[in-house]
Amino acid sequence: MTVAPSGGSTDQAQAPPRPPSGAPQAAPAKAAAPTAADPLAEGYYQFVLGRRLAEEGDVEGAVKAYTRALELDPASADIPAELAELYARASRVRDAIAWSERALKQDPDHTDAHRILGLIYAELASREASGAAASGDAGYRTQAIDHLERALKRATGDPAASMRLTLARIYLQGSSFDRAIATLKQLLADNPWLPQGVALLSEAYTGAGRNADAITLLKSASAMEPAFYETLGEALEKEKRFADAAEAYEQALDAEPADANLKTRLAFCLLSLEDRASVARARDLLEAITKASPTQSWPLYLLSRAQRSLGELDAAEATARRLLAISPSSTSGAHALAQVLEARREWAKIVTALEPVAAGTSKGREADMALILTHLGFAYIELNRQTDAIAAFERGIALEPQDADLKSYLAQALINAKQYDRALTIVRALRAANPAEPRTARLEADALRGLGRFDEGAALLKTLADAATDDLTPWQVLSEYYASDRRYGEAEAVLKTALAKDPGDLDLQFQYGAMLERQKQFAEAEKIFRQVLARNPQHAPSLNYLGYTMIERGSRLEEALSLIKKAVDLDPYSGAYLDSLGWAYLKLNQLDQAEAPLRRAAEQLPRDSVVQDHWGDLLARKGRFAEASQAWRRALAGDGEQIDRALIERKIREAAAKSGKN
């Protein structure tokens, strides 16, 4: 006897033949059992009875009926397959596998037996992939694929669609993207715009690196079914097409206006566009989200970022601290707070905020902790705590051994600490992988300079500059290198060459003006700065440098003060601009107004010799000679740029005499 199990294949090869004359065509609820003299009819009756009992949820009764049917027809493959289906639905996996395998012994191509085994092994493979399966249960994926592929050779209709979906998931699980794509294309050919099929095909395209195909598919699908706009937004976001992604999320929100996740994703894309209007809209969205769900970390982090981008640093700090209050060990909260404090150049506050976080465990979040250590290392550098900076970067590298940026930061800290040989070893290893990178080339040159091999460093940077085509960064780096050794004429010559390549580059023009000023070519320098400002009145470096130059020369002090104030308005946390502002007030003998900006500059830039010298001068003018001497000593211990060491030493002696101290 051959019968088709419930939910089984509809192919003709396994369609049930009509029972012999006299056998019932169906099993009515009160059908009388056939006589023992007619075993075929009795077997068919038992089979149909088993189906009815299974539908009613009487598993044991159904098993008895199927078992009796199998006794009457032991060669049947369909009855064991029906039992396998019954056990599979009852989650009796071992029994389902055993009966499927028995069916396949009778008929190696039995569609339903292969289908049941394929689905069982697919479920086991999914558990295995998530770590739920016992160790050693390997090969489930392979078995699932084998059985499902064999079942699909003859299956049609809904069972075929279900199997193709499962098979595609298994392919994706094993990163067999091309096979998944072929399977899903066939599925969608038979079932156009089936949502699960579209979603999986998009995933398969993305996995195969065919993002354009995924986006094309999702655009078409979204026109048919708006629910796909969210998936389309995700695909566009991965491609960094943030404007298009934002538009897709907007469409998705039309259907789900209260979906906080969609609003958050939209806000992220708007933030990534970076124009002020988009960032302001992102902030507004995120403020609403965090008001409704005040303990969600990611929206709070994004809100702090939006506020910081808009210059709302007090609000950004408050939001970051809210995030840290929710989770004191949160690396995202610490990162957000560090970014705000860096914008203010509040290095000591960064150390206070991040040291407790950095002392925590890094297991499972190595990359996040390495980022915190990076922030901390930068703060230590600015505070002239080079040993601490070295230790922070070394810890970061231990967590992220392949991070080239961390290694370059470590090299910078080593150079600051005068550990030139070690820095040179690190930088040369970095440059072996990327020899044309200007930043690491400058680090190598600085290490060589520290070892007394300045000309080797200059030759290295000159080679890089000569090889550069469109990028003028190597020329700027070479100029800065010459300037670091007070070889301003050579720095000027390098900038002339670079400006011949791109006369309109404002940053190059500014740098050129600075080199002229350092050679006391004040009139020419002022001319260059004013040319830059004529093209960009908001060019803060030129506003500051021109104003400072005029202050140093003692000319047009009120105009100079006005220029510097504009620079400070553009960047109110720049230590360099605050120093210029305070110095201008000091030159104008407005000591009380000079104190706040000079103090902030001195706190922010402890290694800057000029800034410390200026702060010392103000303190001395106010009769605070002991404090002035401390500032001047910091000037002597600092970078040594543009100071007269003999003059500062004399000021220290005079201050000691006035304060009655040696």
Image: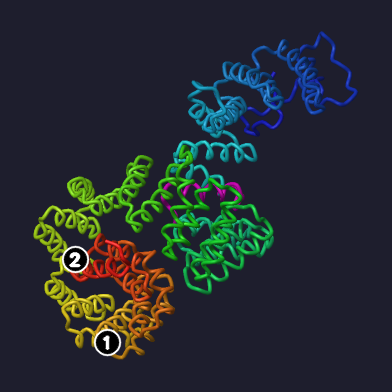
Q: Quadrant of residue 31?
A: top right
Report the residue that reaches farthest toward the right.
Answer: 30
Q: Quadrant of residue 560?
A: bottom left
In the rendered image, is residue 472 in sight?
Answer: no
Residue 486 appears left or right of 602: left
Element class at badge 2: helix
Q: Which residue is mark 2?
A: 484
Q: In this rendering, does residue 532 appear at all?
A: yes
> Can you give x and y, in whole percent of width and height, for residue 143 in the image?
51, 26
Q: Nearer the viewer, residue 319 or 381?
A: 381
**Which residue is at 49% across, 37% downward?**
173
Q: Which residue is mark 1?
A: 554
Which amino acid is tagged 1?
Gly
Location of residue 80 with respect to 260 vertically, above or below: above
Mark 2 in CB contact with mark 1 (< 8 angstroms): no
Question: How far from the left and from the top, in percent, is residue 191?
Answer: 60, 48
Numbered circle sitting on residue 618: none
Is residue 584 or residue 238 the one in the foreground? 584
* Residue 63 higher or lower than 409, as above or below: above
Look at the picture and state if 293 lies above or below 279: above
Left or right of 591 in this view: 132: right
Mark 1 secondary-structure assignment: loop
From the viewer's side, name the closer residue of 518 and 508. 518
Query: Can you name the residue that lies furthest to the front here?
Result: 660
- Residue 504, percent across and down? 26, 81
